[in-house]
Amino acid sequence: MKINISRHQIYILLLSIFLFLFVLVFSFGLLIPEGQEYRVKRTALKKVQKEFNQYQVFHDETLTTLKDLQSKNRNIITAFDRPFSAERFEKQHKLHFSTLTISQVKRAKDEDGFSVYEVNTTSHISSPTNFYDFLDALNKGDWIIGVNFPIKFVRDGEMIKSSFTMKVYANNKDKNASASTSSAK
Amino acid sequence: MKYSYIKPRKKTPFTADVQLIVTFFSITIIMLISTYAFLLFKDYSFAKERANLMQSRIELEKNIEDMDQKIAYIKEQKALSEKVFTQNMVLKDSIANLFDLVPERITLSRADLLQNGLILYGVTPNKDVYNFMLQAPLRSIFQKTYTSFYPADGGWLHFVSTNYVNEDEGEELNSEN
């Protein structure tokens, strides 16, 4: 039996085989490896996205904590930032004293990482109650001030002359750390 | 001389069979190339998105570190301010207690409050009043108490009372404050 295949049919067959081989090589050589890489990259991206989301949540929590702390302690933060002004101090606390004199502000040794300035004060009070009121007012004042020993009370006629040292605490500018500036983005 | 009455059809290599095969493979190849292009584009966008996320994460880390520092600093400020405010209140109570300690019959002319002691100057009608009404409570507070008297006008006595707590206890008190 003789199989009669025309030349045209042979061309069609060869063309089909060539195209089929091209499809096979393209699929297995490029498409499938690329698909695998796509899946790997997609998984890696999901992992990075998940980590990023965790960081974002932690960032938001930290920001909330910071804002909360800043709003609750605004007075304290501002007090540490504010430079001490003897004139303003006298103006604020003069009502507790008959006379109030503040000597020159001098830098003392840093405490707990904060700058400390010493201020010598002499004053006249009519009663110890004035001094108690002054101590109460200090805690609500514009600066963080601690009254330091020695404190001297001397009778001066009908008045009491008091002299004491105050320590004014402020941010240490050398540390370059000011918490009052909100830079949370 | 004509052998046929019909017009001969043109011979072309693009027969119906070839057209069918070419169409089929063309569609297949276009689909494969489209898929490949899509995958390439997605790979590129994944890589870009990943790089962006990493950059954002680094910024977040930096921000978190910055905020942590600020939180720690505010806590330090708060702790120090509370310590100072407490010291002021303790001082206020100490001075109030001191003045409450002095009986009406004894008049103070001067009081020096020291870190670890107290020096009182004043006048007393006699030694007994001083010993019973002022020295006794002072002794209960201070470990070392020295008093010297010298005469004043009208039979009264000037006194200088020097009182100290032990250095160790003084340091303990300071450290507690």
Image (tube, helix red, strand yellow):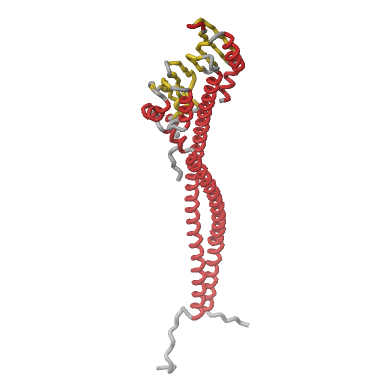
In which quadrant will I find the N terminus of chain B? bottom left
B89 is higher (above) or lower (below) than B53 = above
In which quadrant will I find the C terminus of chain B? top right
Q: Quadrant of residue A165?
A: top left
Q: Percent position (x, y) of residue B29?
A: 50, 68
Q: Is residue A133 something that shows in the picture?
A: yes
Q: Percent position (x, y) of residue A134?
A: 46, 27
Of residue A60 and residue A150, the one placed in the foreground of this image is A150
Q: Residue at x 53, y 80 (%)?
A: A6
Of residue A158 and residue B24, the one placed in the foreground of this image is A158
B69 is higher (above) or lower (below) than B127 = below
Q: Quadrant of residue A105?
A: top left
Of residue B74 and residue B56, the one placed in the foreground of this image is B74
Q: Percent position (x, y) of residue A164?
A: 45, 20
Q: Is residue A161 something that shows in the picture?
A: no
Q: Residue at x 43, y 27 (%)?
A: A96
Q: Percent position (x, y) of residue B115?
A: 52, 18
A153 is higher (above) or lower (below) than A29 = above
Residue sitting farthest toward the left: A87
Q: How many numbered discs, if any? A: 0
Residue sitting farthest toward the front: B154
Of residue A113 and residue B2, the one placed in the foreground of this image is A113
Q: Is residue A84 left or right of residue B107?
A: left
